[in-house]
Amino acid sequence: MKPPKAWADLPFFREDWPAIRDRLESLDNWLPGPALVFAALEATPPERVRAVILGQDPYPTPGHANGLAFSVAPDVGLPRSLKNIFTELRDDIGAVPATGDLSGWAHQGVLLLNTSLSVPPGDAGRHASWGWDRLARDAVAEAQKHGPLAFLLWGSHAQKAVKGLPRPQDLVIATAHPSPLSARRGFFGSKPFSRINDWLREQGREPVDWAA
């Protein structure tokens, strides 16, 4: 479980990761597991980050989480929040990815980072107090060194996680979470995907292919 080389200098990896790593190594089973725990950072190095989408923790059902926020393994049906994301995406731009695997977004510079990168099977939120949240803030601050970012902050958890970090040159789209409990309170109809692409085009940058 070595930190991805491109992110290895973050303060989190010097100061917080050793204790979290020791706790994980003491467990018999946790998700998404050692091979996928840093998948989001490995897929999107800091100099390529254009947009940030923050989740809470990995899906607690074995076989679902693939290390990217809101994403699932290609052969897994869409969880309810991701189904709502795809509904909004289709309404917004008219197309969606073929599966719930969002690695196509990650490889285009969309950092899909959970604020906690581990979870016991069937026990959502159990590792949220372990200190993982500092990694999200450190990662965002590092990515900001390379240019303006679009923040897609769904729900109060994501909004609080990066409070104070967005700058005037960044785009911030903050709405309700796409979960079935809150999606109709401002997530549906927010058109976040086209808004990010319009913002990128205004800067002369390539838009994201959200259907990839």
Image (spheres, rainbow, N blue to C red):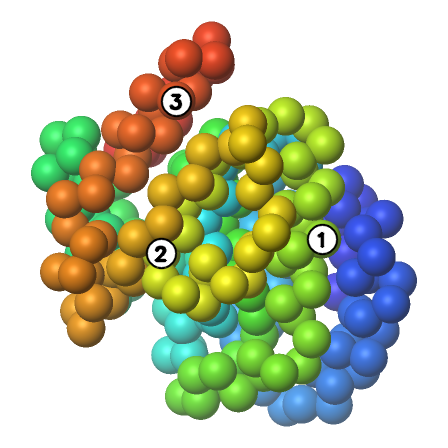
Label 1 and label 3: CA atoms lie apart by: 24 Å
Residue at 82% over, 79% down: 19
Place residue 20 in its image quadrant: bottom right
Q: Which residue is mark 2?
A: 154
Q: Residues within 10 Å of mark 1 (few under 14, many from 20)?
A: some
What residue is shown at x 35% (from left), y 24% (from top)?
A: 197
The reply to whether residue 41 is visible in this rendering is no
Between 93 and 177, the one lying in front of the other is 177
Residue 180 appears in the picture as rendered: yes
Image coords of residue 76 (percent x, y): 28, 63
Instruction: Kindly state the secondary structure of the residue where label 1 is placed.
Output: helix
- Relative side of 74 to 24, left or right: left
Query: Disc 3 and disc 2: Cα gap in Å?
Result: 18 Å
Residue at image point 62% right, 57% down: 136
Q: For the residue carrying disc 3, how many other residues have a C-alpha within 10 Å: few (<14), some (14-19), or many (20+)? A: some
The 10 Å Cα crowd at callout 2, few under 14, some 14 to 19, many 20 or more, is many
Q: Amino acid at mark 3?
A: Trp
Residue ID for mark 1: 138
Residue farthest toward the right in the current orientation of the protein:
14
How many angstroms separate mark 1 from mark 2 (CA)? 19 Å
> Mark 1 vs mark 2: which is more N-terminal?
1
Residue 23 drawn above or below residue 194: below
Horizontal side, residue 16 vs residue 42: left or right: right
Residue 103 image-quadrant placement: top left
Dot 1 and dot 3 residues touching (CB under 8 Å): no
Residue type marked 1: Asp
Q: Which residue is mark 3?
A: 199
Question: Left or right: 199 with respect to 185?
Answer: right
What is the three-letter code of the residue carrying label 2? Answer: Trp
- Quarter of the picture containing the N terminus is bottom right
